[in-house]
Image (cartoon, helix red, strand yellow):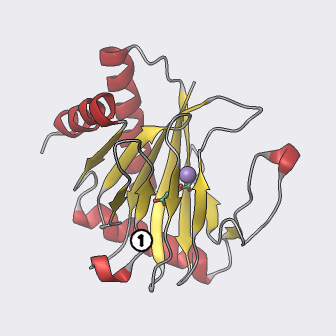
Amino acid sequence: MENELKFEILINSIADKGYGIVDDFINPEMCSELRKRLLANLNNGSLSKAGIGNAAKLQKNVEIRGDSILWIDTDSSDVFEKKYLDLVADFIQYMNRTCFTGLRSSEIHYAVFPPNAFYKKHVDSFANDKSRQYSLIVYLNEDWTDADGGQLKIYQDSGDIEITPLGGRAVCFSSHLIPHEVLPAVRLRQSLTGWLKK
Ligand code: OGA
Ligand code: MN
Protein backbone atom coordinates (compact mmCIF):
# COMPACT_ATOMS: atom_id res chain seq x y z
CA MET A 1 0.00 0.00 0.00
CA GLU A 2 1.24 3.49 -0.83
CA ASN A 3 2.22 5.59 2.16
CA GLU A 4 -0.24 8.29 1.13
CA LEU A 5 -3.05 5.76 1.20
CA LYS A 6 -2.06 4.79 4.76
CA PHE A 7 -1.99 8.47 5.73
CA GLU A 8 -5.47 8.92 4.22
CA ILE A 9 -6.83 5.97 6.19
CA LEU A 10 -5.49 7.42 9.44
CA ILE A 11 -6.69 10.96 8.73
CA ASN A 12 -10.17 9.96 7.54
CA SER A 13 -10.67 7.70 10.48
CA ILE A 14 -9.49 10.36 12.97
CA ALA A 15 -11.98 12.81 11.43
CA ASP A 16 -14.71 10.21 11.60
CA LYS A 17 -14.13 8.43 14.93
CA GLY A 18 -11.37 10.33 16.75
CA TYR A 19 -8.72 7.67 16.20
CA GLY A 20 -7.17 5.89 13.23
CA ILE A 21 -5.64 2.43 12.88
CA VAL A 22 -3.64 1.16 9.92
CA ASP A 23 -1.87 -2.19 9.65
CA ASP A 24 1.55 -2.48 7.98
CA PHE A 25 2.30 1.20 8.55
CA ILE A 26 5.86 -0.14 8.60
CA ASN A 27 6.76 -3.29 6.69
CA PRO A 28 7.83 -6.53 8.42
CA GLU A 29 11.54 -5.92 7.77
CA MET A 30 11.40 -2.46 9.31
CA CYS A 31 9.35 -3.81 12.22
CA SER A 32 11.87 -6.53 13.02
CA GLU A 33 14.88 -4.23 12.53
CA LEU A 34 13.42 -1.61 14.87
CA ARG A 35 12.49 -4.31 17.37
CA LYS A 36 16.11 -5.55 17.29
CA ARG A 37 17.32 -2.05 18.12
CA LEU A 38 14.80 -1.70 20.91
CA LEU A 39 15.86 -5.03 22.43
CA ALA A 40 19.57 -4.19 22.07
CA ASN A 41 18.95 -0.89 23.85
CA LEU A 42 16.92 -2.65 26.53
CA ASN A 43 19.62 -5.28 27.07
CA ASN A 44 22.42 -2.74 27.37
CA GLY A 45 20.50 -0.71 29.93
CA SER A 46 19.74 2.33 27.74
CA LEU A 47 16.04 2.51 28.58
CA SER A 48 14.76 4.48 31.58
CA LYS A 49 11.60 4.24 33.63
CA ALA A 50 9.05 6.59 32.12
CA GLY A 51 7.75 9.56 34.12
CA ILE A 52 4.39 11.29 34.29
CA GLY A 53 3.97 14.88 33.17
CA ASN A 54 6.87 16.94 31.86
CA ALA A 55 9.99 18.21 33.59
CA ALA A 56 8.36 20.39 36.24
CA LYS A 57 6.12 17.60 37.45
CA LEU A 58 8.26 14.57 36.81
CA GLN A 59 7.31 11.70 39.04
CA LYS A 60 8.12 8.06 38.62
CA ASN A 61 5.17 6.03 39.58
CA VAL A 62 4.62 2.46 38.56
CA GLU A 63 1.11 2.72 39.99
CA ILE A 64 0.30 4.83 36.94
CA ARG A 65 2.69 3.62 34.25
CA GLY A 66 5.16 0.76 34.13
CA ASP A 67 6.93 1.27 30.83
CA SER A 68 10.54 2.16 30.09
CA ILE A 69 11.54 4.42 27.24
CA LEU A 70 14.40 5.66 25.09
CA TRP A 71 14.06 8.80 22.95
CA ILE A 72 15.17 8.53 19.33
CA ASP A 73 17.66 11.16 18.31
CA THR A 74 16.05 13.40 15.65
CA ASP A 75 19.29 13.20 13.68
CA SER A 76 19.89 9.49 14.23
CA SER A 77 22.26 8.02 11.65
CA ASP A 78 20.81 4.53 12.07
CA VAL A 79 19.32 3.51 8.74
CA PHE A 80 16.04 2.08 10.08
CA GLU A 81 15.50 4.79 12.66
CA LYS A 82 16.08 7.31 9.86
CA LYS A 83 13.54 5.53 7.67
CA TYR A 84 10.98 5.79 10.44
CA LEU A 85 11.76 9.45 11.13
CA ASP A 86 11.36 10.11 7.39
CA LEU A 87 8.01 8.31 7.33
CA VAL A 88 6.76 10.41 10.23
CA ALA A 89 8.07 13.58 8.53
CA ASP A 90 6.16 12.59 5.37
CA PHE A 91 3.01 12.04 7.42
CA ILE A 92 3.39 15.48 8.99
CA GLN A 93 3.83 17.06 5.57
CA TYR A 94 0.82 15.22 4.21
CA MET A 95 -1.35 16.30 7.14
CA ASN A 96 -0.24 19.91 6.82
CA ARG A 97 -0.94 19.88 3.08
CA THR A 98 -4.35 18.23 3.29
CA CYS A 99 -5.66 19.33 6.71
CA PHE A 100 -3.80 22.60 7.47
CA THR A 101 -2.67 21.14 10.78
CA GLY A 102 0.40 23.41 11.09
CA LEU A 103 2.55 20.63 12.56
CA ARG A 104 6.23 21.43 12.86
CA SER A 105 8.06 18.55 14.49
CA SER A 106 7.85 15.18 16.16
CA GLU A 107 9.29 13.46 19.19
CA ILE A 108 9.51 9.68 19.25
CA HIS A 109 10.61 7.12 21.80
CA TYR A 110 10.98 3.38 22.03
CA ALA A 111 8.76 1.96 24.74
CA VAL A 112 8.64 -1.41 26.46
CA PHE A 113 6.05 -2.58 28.93
CA PRO A 114 7.28 -5.63 30.88
CA PRO A 115 4.74 -8.37 31.53
CA ASN A 116 1.94 -7.10 33.84
CA ALA A 117 2.91 -3.43 33.36
CA PHE A 118 0.21 -0.98 32.31
CA TYR A 119 -0.47 2.71 31.77
CA LYS A 120 -3.64 3.94 33.44
CA LYS A 121 -6.23 6.10 31.69
CA HIS A 122 -4.73 9.44 30.59
CA VAL A 123 -4.51 12.01 27.80
CA ASP A 124 -1.12 12.74 26.26
CA SER A 125 -0.96 16.54 26.19
CA PHE A 126 0.55 18.19 29.26
CA ALA A 127 -1.37 20.70 31.39
CA ASN A 128 1.40 23.29 30.92
CA ASP A 129 2.50 22.46 27.36
CA LYS A 130 -0.04 21.95 24.60
CA SER A 131 2.45 21.44 21.76
CA ARG A 132 1.60 17.74 21.33
CA GLN A 133 -1.20 17.58 18.77
CA TYR A 134 -1.36 13.95 17.65
CA SER A 135 -0.13 10.75 19.22
CA LEU A 136 1.26 8.16 16.81
CA ILE A 137 2.13 4.69 18.07
CA VAL A 138 3.60 1.87 16.02
CA TYR A 139 3.82 -1.57 17.57
CA LEU A 140 6.96 -3.69 17.19
CA ASN A 141 5.65 -6.98 18.59
CA GLU A 142 6.21 -10.32 16.89
CA ASP A 143 3.33 -12.79 16.57
CA TRP A 144 1.11 -11.03 19.08
CA THR A 145 -2.32 -12.53 19.79
CA ASP A 146 -5.38 -11.14 21.60
CA ALA A 147 -4.64 -13.56 24.44
CA ASP A 148 -1.29 -11.83 25.02
CA GLY A 149 -3.23 -8.78 26.26
CA GLY A 150 -1.60 -5.34 26.18
CA GLN A 151 -4.50 -3.77 24.30
CA LEU A 152 -4.65 -0.04 23.86
CA LYS A 153 -8.05 0.91 25.24
CA ILE A 154 -9.56 4.08 23.80
CA TYR A 155 -12.38 5.67 25.77
CA GLN A 156 -15.27 6.97 23.69
CA ASP A 157 -18.81 8.09 24.50
CA SER A 158 -20.02 5.74 21.79
CA GLY A 159 -18.32 2.78 23.53
CA ASP A 160 -14.73 2.01 24.45
CA ILE A 161 -12.59 0.07 22.03
CA GLU A 162 -9.55 -2.14 22.55
CA ILE A 163 -6.78 -2.31 19.98
CA THR A 164 -4.39 -5.27 19.85
CA PRO A 165 -0.74 -4.15 19.53
CA LEU A 166 0.10 -6.08 16.35
CA GLY A 167 3.58 -5.59 14.90
CA GLY A 168 3.56 -2.98 12.12
CA ARG A 169 0.20 -1.54 13.15
CA ALA A 170 -0.08 2.21 13.73
CA VAL A 171 -2.64 4.04 15.85
CA CYS A 172 -3.06 7.80 15.73
CA PHE A 173 -5.34 10.14 17.71
CA SER A 174 -5.59 13.65 19.12
CA SER A 175 -3.23 14.11 22.06
CA HIS A 176 -5.72 16.53 23.67
CA LEU A 177 -9.03 14.81 23.19
CA ILE A 178 -8.65 11.07 23.51
CA PRO A 179 -8.41 9.39 26.93
CA HIS A 180 -6.70 6.03 26.63
CA GLU A 181 -5.05 3.30 28.64
CA VAL A 182 -2.58 0.45 28.10
CA LEU A 183 -3.82 -2.83 29.52
CA PRO A 184 -1.39 -5.34 31.07
CA ALA A 185 0.12 -7.99 28.83
CA VAL A 186 1.57 -11.41 29.53
CA ARG A 187 4.59 -10.69 27.29
CA LEU A 188 7.03 -7.84 26.79
CA ARG A 189 5.11 -5.21 24.81
CA GLN A 190 7.19 -3.16 22.40
CA SER A 191 6.43 0.01 20.48
CA LEU A 192 7.58 3.29 19.06
CA THR A 193 5.47 6.05 20.54
CA GLY A 194 5.58 9.53 19.13
CA TRP A 195 3.89 12.90 19.05
CA LEU A 196 3.32 15.25 16.16
CA LYS A 197 3.81 18.74 17.52
CA LYS A 198 3.02 22.35 16.75
C1 OGA B 1 1.70 6.53 25.86
C2 OGA B 1 0.62 5.59 25.47
C3 OGA B 1 -0.14 3.73 24.14
C4 OGA B 1 0.32 2.41 23.60
O1 OGA B 1 2.87 6.16 25.80
O2 OGA B 1 1.35 7.68 26.20
O3 OGA B 1 -0.52 5.86 25.79
O4 OGA B 1 -0.51 1.71 23.00
N1 OGA B 1 0.90 4.48 24.73
O5 OGA B 1 1.48 2.06 23.78
MN1 MN C 1 -0.73 7.97 26.02
Answer left or right for 108 relative to 159: right
Residue placed most toward the observer, 60 or 168: 60
**As drawn, 90 above or below 193:** above
Residue 14: x %, y % from top left: 33, 34
Residue 94 picture location, percent across and down: 32, 25
Circle 1 residue: 35
- Give the side of residue 56 with respect to residue 99, left or right: right
Q: State the residue in front, 68 or 119.
A: 119
Residue 90 x, y percent position in the rendering: 35, 32
Quadrant where the N terminus is found in the figure: top left
Please tell me whether mark 1 sits on a helix, a strand or a loop.
helix
Specify the farthest residue to the left.
1
Q: Image height check: is 81 above or below 91?
A: below
- The quarter of the picture where the C terminus appears is top right
- Name the quadrant containing residue 129: top right
Residue 195, how many percent across, how many down? 53, 41
Residue 77 shows in this picture: no
Q: Quadrant of residue 140?
A: bottom left
Please name the residue shown 29% across and 76% down the image: 146
Q: Residues within 10 Å of mark 1 (few under 14, many from 20)?
A: many
